[in-house]
Image (cartoon, coloured by chain):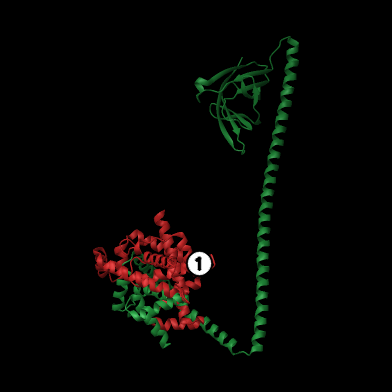
Amino acid sequence: MSASISQKKGWVISRESFNRMLAELHPDNERAGEQYEKIRQKLVKLFEWRGCAHAEECADETFNRVAQKICEGTSIWTDEPYSYFHGVALNVLREYWRSVEQTAKALEEAAQIQELSVDPEDLISRETEQLEKERLLECLNRCLKQLPPESINLITRYHQGEDTPDKARRKELAQLLGIPLNALRIRAYRIRAAVEECVKKCLERGSAG
Amino acid sequence: MRDEADNEKLLTMYLLGSLPEEQRLQVEVEFLSDDHRYERLLALENELFYDYAQNKLSPGEREQFEKRFLSSELNRKKVMIASALIRKISESASVESTGKSIADREPQRFWQSLKSYFVDQSAAMKVSLAASAIVTLALIWLIIGIVMLRNEFDQIRAQQMVQDDRLRQQAQQERARADELDLRLKREMDENEMLQQDLSKMQAQSGGHGQRVPSVISFVLAPSIARDQASGMKNLYLSPGAILLILKLKLKGGAEYKSYHATLLTVEGAERWSQDMLQAKQTGSGRSIDLWLPARTLAPGDYELRLKGYASDGTLEETGDYYYLSIRRK
């Protein structure tokens, strides 16, 4: 956060102010914690999708600012807490972009972004050594073995098929499964996300061991 | 469907950062307040990585994707995983597609016709079909249960048979061992009887001459330090009337065995005599074994006495003790 955005007026969140913010999210502690996690995840993605390189820190800064407002006695909720968080997040984002413009380092990073490779195959060969690739494939094989055959079948059909365009093939697959296209997309996403998570953990175990 | 496609395009533009600010805010308000929309956006984002890995993005989208996502190490890793996964499923699909393409279509048709059959039925018919389905499922469950029980029973029976076989084999081995011991006992009793006869004969002969000839000779034999006949050889003089030779073998301190086996060999290696199941006894000067040999079986000459021990698992091992003796007649 230090390079990207400073904490507003040097205000530091305390346990008390954090708890007060949680209590505003939901009267029940457990539910409030769940709400906090959900909003935080969404804010992190919002910052990422807005091109922020320090998404987690910006999300935390958003919470700090909301907690500060609550401590100052500002009533933040209308019917819906998200819109308030959204507004604060956009302010944090604006400040972030201003700080990016001011730092040469950030400009260098931006320049690097322009020079990125085009072909994912080239990307693999440039970024990783042969051993790393082998390890990735090994992990992938192991993770795919843990998947039920119907899940492998679904993502294969979802992504594979040279004779028909993606849209037509996926529509046909959704009809066959008796679900809307969106539900099929989410189903395929959940399978891929599970594989990615499994591979990530497997690679981490490999590099740790 | 048109709206759906438009919406997808709009969300893709949001993810690639090419949506005007007003619409961008609208998308954000929606996904912040609606978990389903949020997951949909996550799914679309994830799919972009796979489309990128498969070269399915337009040149403009590709550039935007690289600019937006590939500045982070984490996302570059995601592209690698996506690329590897796509390659993997393409390989498996190309292997399976030739064999399965026809086979896959048939179950689909069957499933579709089954589905349409159920959809076309009246409500009463649906209830009765559902009831039949429940009964059929219950029957299948029952059959599976019976089959599993039978498998379990077969396994137990097979284990029982293996155990019976093992017990039978053990009994046979024990019987064979008992027979062997009987035989050995009988042989030693015969030998003993013969020795008794020789002894009485000698006593009768010597009685007339008033001469006492030692009929039993006892000789203590210590193990040789090295396995070397020349240095370890002990001379033993047998008188003509000697009937029984008792060799007291001193044992070295080493390992203790359940019982011992002794073999007397000529220098040429021919076996002259052997005895099994010998027990060591503790004496004042250490542990020793008594060997009772009929003197008449020992022709004058040099001999080696080998001693082996039975370990606790029944195997016969070299004790490492070697005894050498030279028999001479007076």
Which quarter of the image is occupied by the N terminus of chain A? bottom left
Residue B298 showing in the rendered view: no
Of residues A158 and B62, the one drawn nearer to the viewer in this rendering: B62
What percent of the width, then of the height, locates residue B181?
Answer: 70, 36
Chain ID of residue with mark 1: A
Placement of A34 over or under B124, stated as above or below = above
**Chain B display color:** green
What residue is disc 1 on?
Answer: A23
Kind of residue sitting beneath label 1: Ala
Left or right of B311? Residue B77 is: left
Q: How many marks?
A: 1
Please tell me in which quadrant of the rendered image residue A135 appears: bottom left
Left or right of A20? Residue A129 is: left
Name which residue lies at 66% across and 88% down.
Answer: B124
Left or right of B204? Residue B242 is: left
What percent of the width, then of the height, locates residue A141?
Answer: 43, 64
Of residues A191 and B179, the one drawn nearer to the viewer in this rendering: A191
Name which residue lies at 66% across and 54% down.
Answer: B162
**Chain A display color:** red
